[in-house]
Image: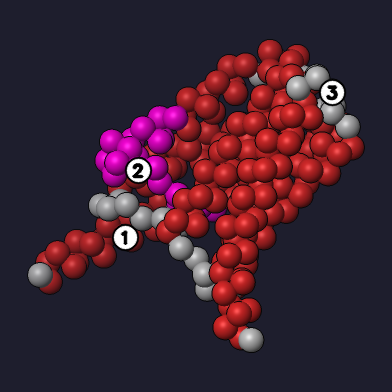
Amino acid sequence: MIAIKKGFIRHVPMALVALRCLIAVLLVIDALDGKTGLWFVIGFAIAGISDMLDGMVARRYKVVSTIGSAMDGYADAFLYTCIVFCIWRVHPEIIKSFFIPVLTIGATQVISWLISLFKYSKITSYHTFGAKVWAVTLFVATFSIFAFNYAGVFLWIAIIVGVASNIEDMMITLVTPYWAHDVSSIRGAFKLREEHKLKIKKL
């Protein structure tokens, strides 16, 4: 019975990641006609909760994996790419007003991925503290847009935090000597580099 329970729990984080991707697609479908309602907000809230729960479950039951960590990051990127599309369909005036800031955050994200691909031949998945703060600000900004038709200061905060988080990811990639996931900060990256140097000296 215990083995069955552990086997089930092992798949919960990935199931939550899959749920988030499915909800993202449903949100896009709902926004295609240029209108959204209560169900859109509820769906997005469930996606946000799933984002918090998958990591909590993985850490709580010690089922964290490299693949799971990477897929979690990809699911987040997919969800918010879909959200940008939804905002464009439902609130095009927001995209027009925030075009340069949104373009900036998108550009820094792409540059971060390109640096990672050039150095490691794959995209990083750090889950830094800054990225977690960014996720919260994005959730608040998106919820505000679709629940209250207000972007304002919440979206500005999300954009500023997002650009800072992407820049930190770039710095971590440049500092770390090898691909690693779940690096909490640039300080953690320097720690990994020093540990790597010590290992080399001992060889």
- Nearest to viewer (mark 3 / mark 1): 3
Q: CA distance from mark 2 to mark 3?
A: 37 Å
**Residue nearest the observer in this picture, 95 or 187:** 95
Secondary structure beneath dot 3 equals loop
Q: Main secondary structure of the magenta part?
A: helix
Q: How is the image coloured?
A: secondary structure
Give the label on residue 192, or none.
Answer: 1
| Residue annotated with mark 3 | 35
User: Residue at point 52% right, 70% down?
Assistant: 63
Q: Residues within 10 Å of mark 1 (few under 14, many from 20)?
A: some
**Above or below 182: residue 137:** above
Q: Which region is colored magenta?
A: 110-130
Q: Kindly identify the amino acid type of the residue bearing the numbered disc 3.
A: Lys
**Residue nearest the observer in this picture, 171 or 24:** 24
Q: Is residue 127 magenta?
A: yes
Give the label on residue 112, or none.
Answer: none
